[in-house]
Amino acid sequence: MSTQSPNATLADLAVVLPAASRVFHRHGLDFCCHGGRPLAEACAERGLDPAAVLTEIDREQGESAPPRWDERPIAELVDHIENHYHRRLRVELPELVALAAKVETRHADKASCPRGLRAHLAAVHESVLSHLAKEEQVLFPMIRSGRARFAAGPIQVMEAEHLDHAEGLARTRALTADLTAPEEACPTWRALYLRLRELEAELMDHIHLENNVLFRRVLAD
C-alpha cells in the first residue's frame, strides 16, 4: 500500500512524511496514541476530505520537513527525545501550573474561569515526571546497552501510560472550553491557553516518536 494513500494509517504517514504531524495537529487528528486508524476513517469522523489532507501534507512536506527518525540511529533518536522533549516538559509543566493558579485566583468570580485546571496540571506534572524517570532510568539505558530483547515489558508499560497522558490532554481541553479563551480573558489567561496548545502538540509529537518510531524499531530488532 502506498504511504500517501487514504488507506495508510495516521501513524505511518507521520513516520514516513514527518511534516504530516503539523497537518494532523491543525485538523485535530490523533496520530500518536490512536495512529493505527486509516486516514480515510479518521477524516470521515471529522468531516474532512482525505485527498485534501494528503495534498496539504505534500505541500507541508515540501516546505520544511522535519527529519525522518525512522532512518536515524536509534541511539540518536533516544538522545533527541531525552534532550528535547524531556527537558522541555520539566521546564514547561511547572510554569503552566503556576500560570493556571494565577488565572484561577484572579478570575475566580467569572463563570468562564477554568476551575480545577491548576490541580489537574499539577497531577499531570507529577505523572509525567514519574514517566520520564522510568524511561531515563530503565528503558533508555536498556536500549542504549543493546538489551532491546528485554524491552517488551517496559515498553508495554510506557504505552499504557501514554494513553493516560492522552486522557490528560482531553481533560485539559474539557476544563478550558477546548483551549478557547473567553472574550474577557486577560493576557495571562490567553498566554496560558496558547502555551497549553503548544504543550499538547509537543506531547503528541513526543508520544508519536516513541510509540510509532522508537518502540517499533526496538521490538523489531
Image (cartoon, rainbow, N blue to C red):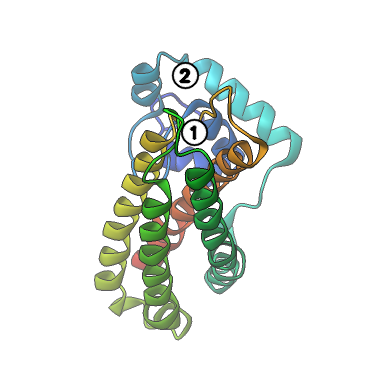
In the image, residue 205 sits, relative to residue 92, either above or below, namely: above
Residue located beneath label 2 in the image: 50
Disc 1 is placed on an element classified as loop
Residue located beneath label 1 in the image: 179
Residue at the image position 38 percent from the left and 66 percent from the top = 126
In the image, residue 183 sits, relative to residue 205, either above or below, namely: above
- Residue found at the far right of this picture: 63
Query: Is the C-beta separation of discs 1 and 2 under 8 Å?
Result: no
Question: Is residue 35 at least partly visible in the picture?
Answer: no
Residue at the image position 45 percent from the left and 42 percent from the top = 12
Question: Is residue 75 at least partly visible in the picture?
Answer: yes
Disc 2 is placed on an element classified as helix
How far across and down, in percent of the image, does residue 138 sit? 37, 81
How far across and down, in percent of the image, does residue 150 sit? 29, 79
Q: Quadrant of the C terminus?
A: bottom left
- Residue found at the far bottom of this picture: 145
Residue at the image position 43 percent from the left and 52 percent from the top = 118
Q: Is residue 81 left or right of residue 172?
A: right
Lower sequence index among marks 1 and 2:
2
In the image, residue 37 sits, relative to residue 153, either above or below, namely: above
- Of badges 1 and 2, nearer the viewer stands 1
